[in-house]
Image (tube, rainbow, N blue to C red):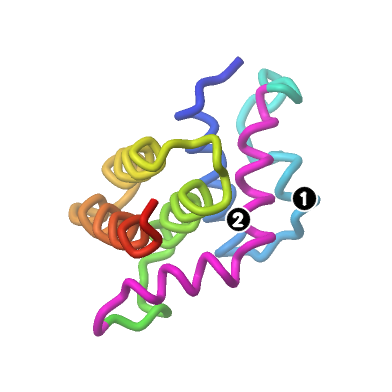
């Protein structure tokens, strides 16, 4: 069984792939891009699939929440890596009731530290914290 962190990273990477390629949900959920895909069982990929599907099914609401936190910054200018991380974080904050707010934010910030640019983690933290406060989560 893979860790929740690894699951979130796989989900983030898949969401980034979707942002770049607009691959169909069915194709995305096969995770065929993963090296040595045969190492992962269906149960290993259950949580990343849940996250990816949840984000894509709720994309309009998620993007509206993100947009609402962008002062003087057009949504279209958000870095695609940061956007993929934010979408995942917002999904966990607002649609996945089993993830505590602090965990959703912390996990997104850590992924941003690892995969984003130098200031990504601060940006991700600010947007997600603003959403959590606005929604009183």
- From the image, tell me which residue sits under label 1: 27
Secondary structure found at label 1: helix
Q: In the displayed structure, does residue 5 sit left or right of residue 121? A: right
Placement of 123 over or under 74, stated as above or below: above
User: Are the residues tagged 2 and 1 within 8 Å (C-beta)?
Assistant: no
Measured Cα–Cα span from mark 2 to mark 1: 15 Å
- From the image, tell me which residue sits under label 2: 55
For the point 40% across and 75% down, the residue is: 67
Lower sequence index among marks 2 and 1: 1
What are the residue bounds of the magenta stretch? 44-72
Please state the horizontal and vertical placement of residue 59, each as a whole percent of the image.
60, 66
What secondary structure do most residues of the magenta stretch adopt?
helix
Q: In the displayed structure, does residue 133 sit left or right of residue 137? A: left
Please state the horizontal and vertical placement of residue 62, each as a whole percent of the image.
52, 65
Placement of 133 over or under 53, stated as above or below: below
Q: Residue furthest top?
A: 1
Residue 56, quarter of the rendered image? bottom right
Q: In the displayed structure, does residue 108 sit left or right of residue 37? A: left
Secondary structure found at label 2: helix
Please state the horizontal and vertical placement of residue 28, each as a whole percent of the image.
71, 49
Q: Magenta span has 18?
A: no
Camera-side residue of 89 and 18? 89
For the point 49% across and 74% down, the residue is: 64
Q: In the displayed structure, does residue 134 sit left or right of residue 35? A: left
């Amino acid at each position: 069984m893979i860790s929740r962190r690894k699951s979130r990273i796989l989900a983030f990477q898949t969401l980034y792939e979707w942002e770049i390629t607009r691959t169909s949900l069915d194709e995305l959920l096969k995770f065929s891009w993963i090296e040595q895909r045969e190492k992962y069982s269906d149960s290993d990929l259950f949580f990343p699939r849940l996250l990816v599907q949840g984000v894509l099914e709720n994309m309009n609401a998620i993007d509206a929440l993100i947009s609402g936190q962008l002062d003087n910054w057009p949504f279209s200018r958000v870095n695609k890596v940061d956007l993929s991380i934010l979408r995942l974080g917002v999904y966990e904050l607002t649609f996945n009731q089993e993830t505590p707010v602090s965990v959703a934010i912390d996990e997104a910030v850590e992924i941003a530290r690892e995969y984003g640019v130098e200031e990504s983690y601060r940006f991700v933290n600010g947007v997600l914290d603003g959403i959590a406060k606005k929604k009183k989560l």
